[in-house]
Amino acid sequence: MDQGGTPPVFSASARTDDDHLSVVVTGEVDMATADAMLQTVLREPAARVTLDLRAVTFFDSAAIHAVVRLAGRYPGALTVLPSRQVSRVLEIAGLGTQPWLHPA
């Protein structure tokens, strides 16, 4: 099995169930892709949002900013499911105890 080579490809896909939007994000979320993640959430009307980041392999300050913006946009209605890497970055950033963060 080849462990090197190509970097993880970013993707963000949305699924709506009534007033609940679920967005699954994979790969690296950085300054080049954080806005795409944000726009994927914002383009669909929803009362509740789940942002599934369990397949995210890299998460930088632009990604943090996007999640904080979503938390402000959906107060009490955002759930973030982080990968181990995302949890660590949010913990370091002082956001590890936010009510929207639901570590596995």
Image: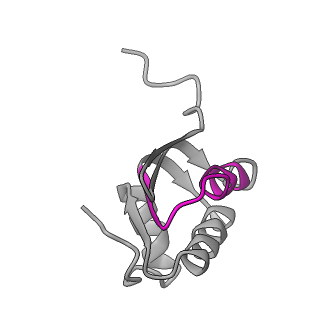
Q: Is residue 72 above or below residue 84?
A: below
Is 22 in the magenta? no
Name the quadrant containing residue 68: bottom right
What's the colour scheme?
one colour
Furthest-front residue in this view? 18
User: Where residue 55 sits: x, y (%)?
Assistant: 41, 44
Is 37 in the magenta? yes
Report the front residue among 43 and 4.
Answer: 43
User: Where residue 53 sits: x, y (%)?
Assistant: 44, 53
Q: In which quarter of the image is the C terminus?
A: bottom left
The residue positioned 37% from the left and 84% from the top of the image is 97
User: Where residue 84 sits: x, y (%)?
Assistant: 35, 57
72 relative to 83 in the view: left or right: right
Q: Quadrant of the N terminus?
A: top left
3 relative to 67 in the view: left or right: left
The residue positioned 54% from the left and 76% from the top of the image is 71
Q: From which residue to which does the magenta span run? A: 35-53
